[in-house]
Image (cartoon, helix red, strand yellow):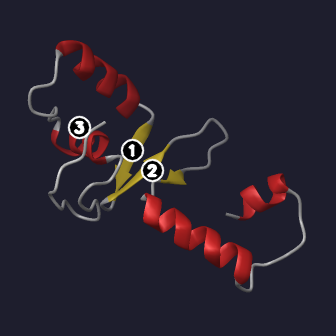
Amino acid sequence: MCCYTIEVCNVKLATWYYEIYQYLTKQEYPPGSSPKAQRALRLLASQYFEDKGMLYKKTNMGINLLCVTHDEVREIMKEVHRGEWRGHMNGRMLAKKV
């Protein structure tokens, strides 16, 4: 997926999920995309939904996962490991906490 330098609601420039967000909100494909790439984007976008300007991934467990940028992931992980969330647990429990 390529990224664009346009800001739309909470989807900021150069996010990995920009094309998915554009397709879900405006039914637009990336400029110059092939029919095969457009089909792949439709299939990928069917796993996501938009709510109040934020993109979420659907899961079969009923938990909606918020899509975040790579920079946000770093900040979340720092906070989980050093903040008041810190604890002694295995990887599965830590993943549930995040």
Outermost residue to the bottom = 84
Please, is residue 73 above or below residue 32 in the view? Answer: below
Residue 59 as seen in the image, left or right of residue 54:
right
Q: Which comes sooner in the sequence, label 2 or label 1?
A: 1
92 relative position to 26: left or right: right
Q: Amino acid at mark 3?
A: Tyr
Q: Under tag 3, what secondary structure?
A: helix
Residue 40, x across and y down, in percent: 33, 21
Residue sitting at 75 percent across and 79 percent down? Answer: 85
Q: CA distance from mark 2 to mark 3?
A: 14 Å
Q: Are marks 2 and 1 in contact (CB under 8 Å)?
A: yes
Q: Earlier in the sequence, mark 3 or mark 1?
A: 3
- Neighbor class of circle 1 (other Cα within 10 Å; few <14, some 14-19, many 20+) is some
Residue carrying label 1: 49
Residue 75 on image: x %, y %: 54, 73
Name which quarter of the figure residue 30 lies in. Answer: top left
Tags 3 and 1 in contact by the CB under 8 Å rule? no
The residue where tag 3 is placed is 23
The answer to whether 55 appears left or right of 80 in the picture is left
Q: CA distance from mark 3 to mark 1?
A: 10 Å
- The Cα atoms of the two marked residues, 2 and 1, are separated by 5 Å
Amino acid beneath label 1: Phe
| Residue 77 horizontal/vertical position (percent) | 63, 68
Residue at 73% x, 56% y: name it.
Answer: 95
Task: State left or right for residue 26 relative to residue 61.
Answer: left
Quick one: label 2 or label 3, which is nearer the N terminus? Answer: 3
Query: Residue type at mark 2?
Result: Tyr
Residue position for label 2: 56
Q: Nearer the viewer, residue 61 or 81?
A: 81
Mark 2 Cα within 10 Å, few/some/many (few <14, many 20+)?
some
